[in-house]
Image: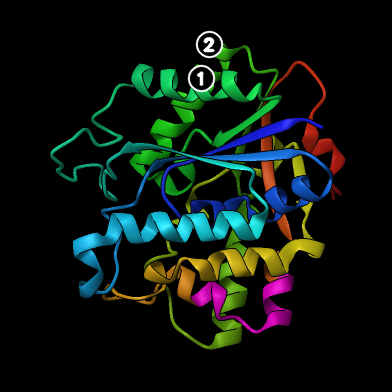
Amino acid sequence: MATVVFVHAHPDDEALLTAGTMRGLKEKGHRVVVVMATNGEAGLSEISNYTDLGNIRKRELEKSARILGVSETYFLNFRDSGLDGKAQATTSTLCQATVEEIAEQISAILKIENAQLVVGYDSQGGYGHPDHIQIHKAVIAAAKLANTQVVANATVDRQTIAKLLDYIRLIIKIGPLKDLASLADGFTPRADITHTIDISQWTGFKRASMRAHGSQRVGGTTIRTLQVFSNLPSKIFNRAFHFEWFEVVTNNGANPLDDLPVK
């Protein structure tokens, strides 16, 4: 059994990017740990949630973690930087912190957990969110400090996501989703992806994980990504979300991802 640490920026990122893989690793006998850098205070939601949004999203993450079989959850308690990275806070936002400061906190957890594999984000931060880019840099640095043997970027196949968005729009007959428009221009080219994990047997857990983040399915002036995804009919959801993608960037030992079904 190995310990795998997933580092995410905001509650619900784990649901969208890595939920099936996390559950699969759990069922294969590995210890799964989540490190959450912020509580997502700057996210969109209903107005009534804003006075306590950070704590609401923290509780939602804890619910998601239980669904996915996570053994331990750590919160770094940096503040959410917002979509443009400019959110203001009385304490340091993730973007205001230095990469070294973030990396030191992550590396301490990697050492405590004796992690075999640590998972961060790709170099673009997926769709370019400044907090995701910070996590990418910090995870790479933390892995070096902790001498973690295997390092991977959670990402999406850029070609697949463009087709996925077109498919969803066609099936549910809605127009372009502003919330999703930038996704097809980000993430990772197919040639750079090392592991396409078939999560078909765990899509139910992924869907339940998405639905755990109720505050992120409401509010805002456009249709919410999580609302669209989590409300898809089961057959369409299973077809649309039966893969998760990773780019292994450091591989100096046994890789727990190799224990999962790979396309």
- Which quadrant is home to the N terminus? top right
For the residues labelled 2 and 1, say whether their Cβ atoms are less than 8 Å apart: yes
Image point (30%, 75%), residue name: 219
Q: Percent from the top left, x then y, of residue 11?
A: 44, 53
**Badge 2: how crowded within 10 Å, few (<14), some, or many (20+)?**
some
**Depicted 148 relative to depicted 185: above or below:** above
Image point (76%, 45%), residue name: 25
For label 2, the residue is 145
The one of 21 and 169 positioned closer to us in this rendering: 21
Name the element at disc 1.
Answer: helix
Task: Give the residues in magenta.
Answer: 228-239
Name the element at disc 2.
Answer: helix
Left or right: residue 237 compared with residue 260: left
For label 1, the residue is 107
Image point (49%, 47%), residue name: 186
Name the residue furthest bottom.
Answer: 173
Q: CA distance from mark 2 to mark 1?
A: 6 Å
How are the colours assigned in the image?
Answer: rainbow
**Depicted 225 relative to depicted 43: above or below:** below
Please state the total of marks drawn on the protein image.
2
Q: Percent from the top left, x then y, of residue 156?
A: 61, 49
N-term-proximal mark, 2 vs 1: 1
